[in-house]
Image: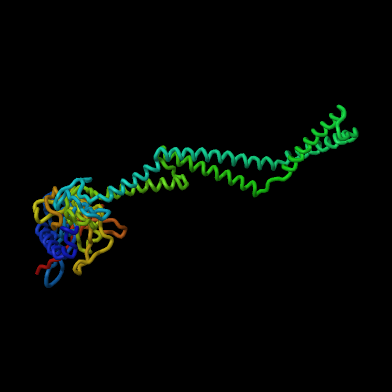
Amino acid sequence: MTSVTASPSEKAPKLGARLSTNLEKARLKIPLLSRVPKKAFWIVLIVVVVAGVGTGAYAALRPSQTTAAATTAALQTATARQGDLVLEASGTGYLVAASESSVGFDISGKISSLNVKLGDTVEKGQLLAQLDDTSEQSALADAQRALLEMTSPEAVANAELAVTTAQANVTNAQIALNNQLYWKNDALIQDYYSKYVIAKANLDRAQTMYDNLNVGEYINDANEAQAYQALYNAQQAYNSASYYVSLYSQKPTQRQLDAAQATLDLANARLTNAQNYLAALKSGDVPDDATGSSMDGLRQAKLAVQTAQDNLDATKLYAPIAGLVMTFNAEVGGTAQGTIMTIDDLSQAKIQFYMDASDWSNVKVGYDVSVSFDSLPNQTFSGKVTEVMPGLISVQGTTMVEGTALLDSSVADIGLPVGVDAGIDVISGQALNAILVPVEALHELPDGTYTVFVMKNGSPTLTTVEVGLQSDTFTVITSGVSVGDVVTTGIVETSTK
């Protein structure tokens, strides 16, 4: 966050000092941890003992035959107690908002109004600023006028006429193709040829009858007239048969058939385009698969209107999220360029934290955290780790783990500004109300099982146990030992003279 948050390198001088302070506090609260070597970052082991602390000692003395001194061996013991074992990795960081949005216009222009200022709280969708929109208003009006011309009653009537014309063209093309297919029929050709042969025979017979009557220049009687009429009729029938046999005997070529089919396909495509365009003009819906120059023109006109509307809308700047205006760089009359403000969502709070590289295995996404602030010494805030950077970073020569934790409280609930320093404990494991014994009492056998020596009737008795969470100082016993049992933790040899 550029306006209020220091970079990791700027924070680094405070990190080591704070960790050192936390470490000293931990040592004061938990004397048992004072034996652990100090380092910049370490796992704080907190043991809250809820049962009474008591120790017993059993001395097993065995005399030794020496001339100078007698040696005795004493068992060290500890009492199993009930308490909480918590493993924590400590670090430092600073408070940040859960999310931040950079806000700016998508187009350039002169700012005509500003409705917020630095530090204002805004709601999502609130109008923040506006550009001079004179040219955008004009462009939208022009685009709407052009679209109106294309969808006017006259344009609709012309589209209807185009559909009617296209339908007629389809009908004519279909007839032409049918004729081509009709002429290609072999049976039909044979039929016309048969009619031709008969008509030729009838003509020859009528001609013979006419010739046999020796008709002169003039027809003198009814027989001659009848023969003439028969000859005339036979000639007409022959001429007709000859025409059709000549016509149908010439089959259409494949090219002629293909051309007729292509003409019909083109007529159908033009009819479809005309129908789609008419439907688009009447309903306002353009089919996805519609084609044609008229449809393309309609699409372009609608796109021009949408583009002009988008440009007009872009002259108004709205808040993308609710939150606090953290940075502000704009003035009325100035030119809008890039981001003019940032808004932080304060409904949740995060901690940007840093820990020693040795704590890498103890900081995982999902682990619980406990956070405190120097400004609020008597309060702690809970949350969870939400992100751990996949690689270590270097801050002023120190290798660190970087991560973020989301707190259960909002920034407003915490009552501190973003950027304030914080101390954080990442809880990598905990056992509450558990049975605890010192780790020195635990013995691991070759088969992986664990045992302890429990003092029974004054003698140490080997007992198999099951263990849970372990620290450098204590281990949790889940079975085999009860609260109050005395376990051995080692042998101390002493000499007496």
Please report the residue visible at 27 percent of the width from the left and 63 percent of the height from the top: 391
| Image quadrant where residue 444 sits | bottom left
Residue 457 appears in the picture as rendered: no
Q: Which of 117 and 217 is in front in this view?
A: 217
Horizontally, residue 105 falls left or right of residue 254, namely left
Quadrant housing the C terminus? bottom left
**Number of numbered discs on residues:** 0
Q: In this view, does 10 lie above or below 475?
A: below
Q: In this view, does 22 lie above or below 302?
A: below
Residue 447 appears in the picture as rendered: yes
Q: Nearer the viewer, residue 457 or 288?
A: 288
Please report the residue visible at 12 percent of the width from the left and 55 percent of the height from the top: 373
Quadrant housing the N terminus? bottom left
Horizontally, residue 233 falls left or right of residue 174, namely right
Q: Where is residue 420 in the image (x, y as percent from the top left)?
A: 13, 57
Horizontally, residue 340 falls left or right of residue 232, namely left
| Image quadrant where residue 385 sits | bottom left
Q: Where is residue 331 in the image (x, y as percent from the top left)?
A: 17, 55
Q: Position of residue 275 (x, y in %)?
A: 48, 40
**Residue lying furthest bottom in this view?**
68
Q: Where is residue 195 in the image (x, y as percent from the top left)?
A: 78, 36
Q: Which of 415 and 170 is in front in this view?
A: 170
**Residue lying furthest top in this view?**
222
Colouring mode (rainbow / by chain / secondary structure / one colour): rainbow
**Residue lying furthest front in this view?**
217
